């Protein structure tokens, strides 16, 4: 009998999302988890009566856990179906995409490949940063969770699928690392774009140029007003239209 939800998300989201689900089902048992190691401690009997819900987590749920869940697993992915995989906001900025969004889907062994149950989309504002785009996606993801929280908390049956399919390109740590490997002959415009999209030290990776065995890592720097506020003695000499960039050896 379905009576338990394994809520797989960060500590900041746990009480809010758990409260929303208990508002629909006061008897629901909610088991918090944030890491694969915590999932590994769950017993087969608990998994058999559980549904897993993952919300905005980069941690992959092991296939052994998915196969033991009695009532399936759903993931709330902070990107639209066109951007399955890791760091969807970064790749959308890099692609100069016009639209972004959020996706809820049934989880299968392959990452971000299961049937989609909800998809939200919105236009990308001009000049938005990676952090700004992630914030907008998170807001739409929270709205999707609120809309689906009742059936997820009260119904043992799977959620109905919608006729939307995932995009073909699936990003990963490998593809993220590859795009951060900067060739020496890169054009200036392309370098600026990569720094804007990937120069925020996500996953400990930055756009990197290797010259004579020395690695130079490019990090997106604060805007000129922010830099001046942090250090009033600093001067900023930046060509118009060029994003600021800091190099680290």
Image (tube, grey):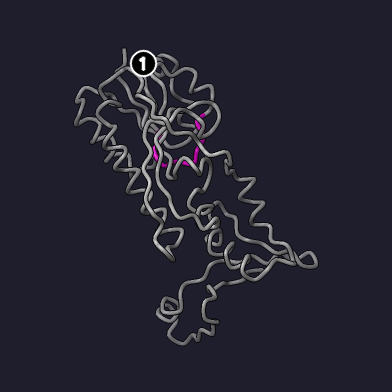
**Would you say residue 249 sits in the magenta stretch?**
no
| Viewport quadrant of the C terminus | bottom right
* Circle 1 residues within 10 Å: few <14, some 14–19, many ≥20: some
Main secondary structure found in the magenta portion: loop
For label 1, the residue is 49
The residue under the point 36% across, 16% down is 49
Q: Residue at the location (43% across, 40% down)? A: 77
Q: Nearer the viewer, residue 18 or 97?
A: 97
Residue 21 image-quadrant placement: top left
Is residue 9 shown above or below 25? below
Q: Nearer the viewer, residue 248 or 165?
A: 165
Give the number of callouts: 1
Q: Is residue 110 above or below residue 131?
A: above
**Residue shown at the point (57%, 72%) measured from the top left:** 246
Residue farthest front in this picture: 163
When the figure is inspected, residue 216 is found, relative to residue 178, above or below; the finding is: below
Q: Is residue 224 left or right of residue 210?
A: left
Q: Residue 58, percent across and down?
A: 49, 41
Q: Position of residue 164 (x, y in %)?
A: 44, 33
Location of the N terminus by quadrant is top left
In this picture, residue 86 sits left or right of residue 136: right
Q: Residue 30: x percent and y percent?
A: 31, 28
**Which residue is situated farthest in the right direction here?**
212
Helix, strand or loop under label 1:
loop
Specify start and end residues of the magenta stretch as a single range.
Answer: 54-61
Tell whether 127 sits left or right of 202. Answer: left
Residue at the top extreme? 1
| x then y, percent, for residue 68 | 47, 17
Q: Residue at x 64, y 71 (%)?
A: 188
């Amino acid at each position: 009998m379905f009576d338990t939800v394994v809520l797989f998300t960060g500590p900041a989201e746990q009480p809010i999302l758990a409260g929303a689900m208990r508002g629909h089902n006061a008897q629901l048992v909610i088991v918090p988890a944030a890491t694969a190691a915590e999932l590994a401690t769950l017993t087969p009997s608990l998994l058999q009566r559980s549904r897993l819900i993952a919300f905005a987590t980069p941690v992959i749920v092991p296939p052994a856990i998915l196969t033991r869940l009695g009532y399936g697993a759903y993931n709330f992915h902070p990107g639209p179906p066109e951007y399955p995989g890791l760091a969807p906001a970064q790749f959308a900025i890099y692609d100069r995409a016009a639209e972004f969004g959020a996706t809820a889907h049934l989880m299968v062994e392959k990452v971000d490949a299961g049937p989609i149950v909800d998809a939200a989309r919105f236009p990308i504002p001009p000049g938005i940063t990676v952090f700004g785009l992630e914030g907008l996606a998170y807001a739409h993801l929270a709205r999707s969770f609120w809309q689906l929280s009742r059936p997820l908390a009260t119904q043992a049956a799977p959620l109905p699928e919608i006729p939307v399919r995932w995009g073909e390109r699936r990003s990963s740590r490998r593809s993220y690392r590859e795009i951060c490997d900067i060739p020496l002959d890169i054009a200036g415009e392309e370098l600026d774009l990569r720094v804007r999209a990937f120069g925020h030290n996500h996953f400990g990776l930055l756009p990197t140029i290797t010259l004579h065995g020395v690695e130079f890592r490019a990090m997106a720097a604060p805007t000129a007003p922010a830099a001046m506020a942090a250090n009033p003695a600093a001067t900023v000499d930046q060509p118009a239209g060029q994003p600021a960039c800091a190099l680290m050896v």
